[in-house]
Image (cartoon, helix red, strand yellow):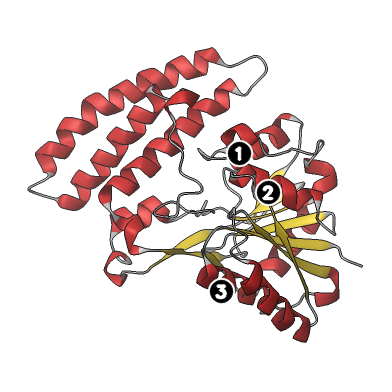
Amino acid sequence: VIEISVQIMTFHRDAGLRRAVRSVLAQRDVDPAAIEILVVDNSAAASARQNATALAQEAARGGYRLRYIHEPAPGIARARNCGIRNSGGDLIAYVDDDEEADPDWLASLLSCRRRFDADAVGGPVLPIFEDRRFAGDPFWVWIYDYDEKKPSGSGFRATGTGNCLFSKARCCPGDKPFDPALGLTGGSDTRFFHDITVRGGRIVWCAEAIIHEYVPAARTRLIYGLRRRMRQSQLFQQGFSWSKPADWRSIAKWMLIGLGQMAFYAPSSLAWWAIDRHRARRYLALTFGGFGKVFWFPLMTPAVYGLRHGAGQG
């Protein structure tokens, strides 16, 4: 009987998909018979079908079941909703197609969920840079390192599905738990976890469940990192508008804080540029974060998913 559906949304990343699936096949202390691997292909041309067929045969040799589903409608929210509708088990875990799970990842999530009776569990996503020069760069580690640095069982404000496990019955009251309106701009996962919290659900941190994200050289361009910080701040603000009624007082407060960030960090970045490039880039990123807090409106958020040349899917 399938109990756990490990789902991988994919979009034109054959090598990444193979790496992600094989990391699931290498999990320790789990029963393969209770697990399915569900690959949801969000490319219009079903480009991952052949790759998934070969991976299904590989999975079968290890006692796992791998299923392939094609969701041609663009947007990662639609792909996630498709995966949830087709899940064979109540527990759903996510790995992105640019990620690799540690061997104890799934067992750690399951143990943490049982121990703390959580509706959802999340864990660290640590970067592996294609260009190793960035591995020790404090700026890029700060941009990409997603680690709450809290003990397991601590509550936290989950924002992404790059490393998580949740109960479909407890977290997905409808057939579209991920908002399709946010499918191309990103943020449907942030809203998903926001809605769980609003309904009184419990989300806890699992420090032992580690996933690594592979960061290509194209994503270590400064402008990409700055836009990432801006988008994170936009989502932070938009979270207040998702409340019923919207929390306009908090929105106004953080818009003022954002203006302060822009006024302070922009000139500071220029002043430090010739002296300390690491500090200057961090101040510039904080400036963009302030910009996102001020200009948070949904119509001002760019589409980033489904772009083959950059952001990709996941």
Q: Nearer the viewer, residue 288 or 154?
A: 288
Q: Residue at x 76, y 33 (%)?
A: 200
The disc, 1 or 2, on the residue closer to the chain's N-terminal end is 2
- For disc 1, the marked residue is 188
Circle nearer the N terminus (3, 2):
3
Question: Image check: 230 left or right of 37?
Answer: left
Q: Residues within 10 Å of mark 3 (few under 14, many from 20)?
A: some
Distance between the alpha carbons at the discs numbered 3 and 2: 20 Å
Query: Is 167 located above or below residue 25 in the figure?
Result: above
Most distant residue in the left direction: 274
Which residue is the site of mark 3? Answer: 19
Q: Is residue 129 above or below residue 313?
A: below
Q: Nearer the viewer, residue 74 or 121?
A: 74
Image disc number at residue 80: 2
Q: Amino acid at mark 1?
A: Ser
Which residue is at the front of the view, 295 or 111?
295
Look at label 2 and name its amino acid.
Arg
Quadrant in which the C terminus appears: bottom right
Find residue 258 and report its image quarter: top left
Q: Which residue ends up furthest to the front in the rendered image?
A: 45
The answer, for residue 31, to whether it is visible in the render is: no
**Residue 280, how many percent across, how many down?**
19, 44
- SS for dot 2: helix
On the question of residue 110 being in view, the answer is yes
The quarter of the image holding the N terminus is bottom right
Q: Residue at x 57, y 47 (%)?
A: 160
- Label 2 neighbour load within 10 Å: few <14, some 14-19, many 20+: many
Question: Which amino acid type corresponds to the residue marked 3 in the rendered image?
Answer: Arg
Residue 303 lies, in percent from the top left, at: 46, 38
Q: Earlier in the sequence, mark 1 or mark 3?
A: 3
